[in-house]
Amino acid sequence: MKHGAKLLAWTCAGILALAGPSVAKKPRTISIADDPTLGERSAALVLVEISDFQCPYCGKGAREVLPRVYEQYVTAGKVELVFLDLPLKMHEHAFQAAEAAQCAGEQNLFWDMHHYLFAYQTALTREDLVRYAGELELEVGPFVECLDSGRHDAAIREDIEVARKLRIQGTPAYVLGRRVPASDDVEVLEVISGLPPYEVLEEKINGLLASP
């Protein structure tokens, strides 16, 4: 496929432990119970964005590819968008940026912070994160308390474990799947490692929407 070479090149390479029997087989389902979502729960498909706020290719995807998915499929009720954190160790500010987004989520502004962090991803120090909270009109006191508490650390590490089991070693990555009825589990249909051109993602989504 013409796009294939670009797909794997546009990736922030991470180092995840992949040895051992727990990753011998990719999971058929993943849980999204505690993850931020956008769109209708009843949507036919779920698109999981697995990302690192400091990764430039993740930023490119968040700014250029996902908005088109949102306009075409999420607003139409066909796709539900979900976010999973995969802050890579090579990016010194990525983990705290992930915490900042989760803390914004406590005030129902996760996606606003998500967009902000990817818009300004070269400035992700603690001072920057607190400033962004103010610019987004979050209650800064509770935001700072959340950021300093580390209470979202475990959830972020759970997301990292999901990525490990899916054998995802870099960011961004995308999972296409379907919600298991009456649950917060997603049946994994396809895993895309790297940043696909929108047209590739569009083709895959349309193909899955057309299949029973």
Image: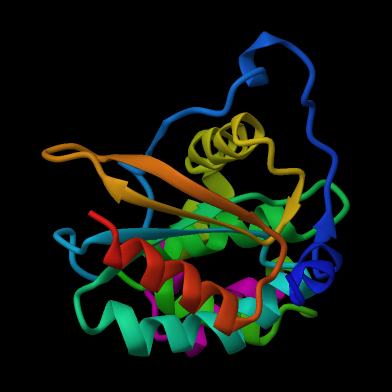
Instruction: Name the residue: 74% across, 12% down.
Output: 20
From the viewer's side, name the closer residue of 80 and 177: 177
Q: How many marks?
A: 0
Is 154 left, or right, of 53 in this rendering?
Answer: left
Q: How is the image coloured?
A: rainbow
Indicate yes or no whether the magenta region holds residue 171.
no
Give the position of the N terminus as an image quadrant.
bottom right
From the viewer's side, name the closer residue of 37 and 64: 64
User: Dominant secondary structure of the magenta stretch?
Assistant: helix
Place residue 81 in its image quadrant: bottom left
Residue 94, given in percent of the width and then of the height, sits at: 72, 58
Is 5 left, or right, of 129 in this rendering?
Answer: right
Give the position of the C terminus as an image quadrant.
bottom left
From the viewer's side, name the closer residue of 56 and 181: 181
Instruction: Name the residue: 47% across, 87% down.
Output: 67
Q: Which residues are magenta?
A: 127-142
Residue 38 appears in the picture as rendered? no
Residue 58, given in percent of the width and then of the height, sits at: 68, 70
Instruction: Name the residue: 66% across, 56% down.
Output: 96
Q: Is residue 165 above or below residue 66?
A: above
Is 55 left, or right, of 135 in this rendering?
Answer: right
